[in-house]
């Protein structure tokens, strides 16, 4: 008889504890993430190769975050002129900015090293070299899709 009473007491205590734990479980649940809307001021037109890549990147961010992060592109300096992109980001006008180092001469001296021809006789030879390499890579990519 005493074992039965002890068993009922222990069972009742376990039941009460289980109910208390279940009552507080919703408080421990992870809150739904807040939606994040970002603006992206981009130097290039939306139909330009870089504009298309930027839009694909923004779409991928949206997809990987299950729609929590949305990036709206503003092509051709829709929020700020290309030369003022850096200032627009630092002042909060845009959240993300794509510009050209030539527009910010003196602001990022270490980055300006990439503007030096490095073994090329002039900037035109460098441009022609990188353009033909990029086009070859793009053509290979297009052929792989076809």
Image (cartoon, rainbow, N blue to C red):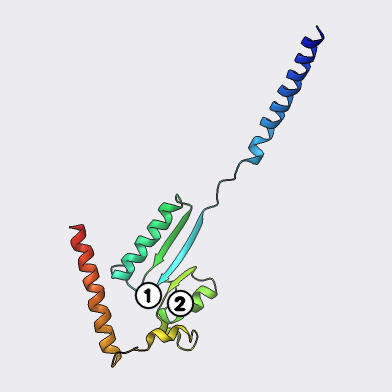
Q: Is residue 102 visible?
A: no
Q: Is residue 125 above or below residue 45?
A: below
The quarter in which the N terminus is drawn is top right
Label of residue 54 in the image: none
Question: Residue 111: which quarter of the image?
Answer: bottom left
**Residue 97 coordinates in the image, percent (x, y):** 45, 72
The quarter in which the C terminus is drawn is bottom left
Q: Is residue 34 above or below residue 26?
A: below
Which residue occupies the extreme right position in the image? 2
Q: Which one is earlier in the sequence, the residue at label 2 or at label 1? A: 1
Mark 1 lies on a secondary structure that is loop
Question: Residue 131: which quarter of the image?
Answer: bottom left
Characterize the local packing of mark 2: few (<14), some (14-19) or many (20 or more) Cα atoms within 10 angstroms: many
Residue at which label 1 appears: 43
CB under 8 Å between discs 2 and 1: yes
Mark 2 lies on a secondary structure that is helix
Which residue occupies the extreme bottom position in the image? 121
Characterize the local packing of mark 1: few (<14), some (14-19) or many (20 or more) Cα atoms within 10 angstroms: many
**Residue 140 coordinates in the image, percent (x, y):** 21, 66
Q: Residue at x 76, y 22 (%)?
A: 13
The reply, left or right, for residue 33 in relation to residue 59 is right
**Residue 41 coordinates in the image, percent (x, y):** 42, 71
**Residue 18 coordinates in the image, percent (x, y):** 69, 27
Distance CA(mark 2)–CA(mark 1): 8 Å
Q: Residue at x 22, y 78 (%)?
A: 132
Residue at which label 2 appears: 85
Question: Residue 79: which quarter of the image?
Answer: bottom left
């Amino acid at each position: 008889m005493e074992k039965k009473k002890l068993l009922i007491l222990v069972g009742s205590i376990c039941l009460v504890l289980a109910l208390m734990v279940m009552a507080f479980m919703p408080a421990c649940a992870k809150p739904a993430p807040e939606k994040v809307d970002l603006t992206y001021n981009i130097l290039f037109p939306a139909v330009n190769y870089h504009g298309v890549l930027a839009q694909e990147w923004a779409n991928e961010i949206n997809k990987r975050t299950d729609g929590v992060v949305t990036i709206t592109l503003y092509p051709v300096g829709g929020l700020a002129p290309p030369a003022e992109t850096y200032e627009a980001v630092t002042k909060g006008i845009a959240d993300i900015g794509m510009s050209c180092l030539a527009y910010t001469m003196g602001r990022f001296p270490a980055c300006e090293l990439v503007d030096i021809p490095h073994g090329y006789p002039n900037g035109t030879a460098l441009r022609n070299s990188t353009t033909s390499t990029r086009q070859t890579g793009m053509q290979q990519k297009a052929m792989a899709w076809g």
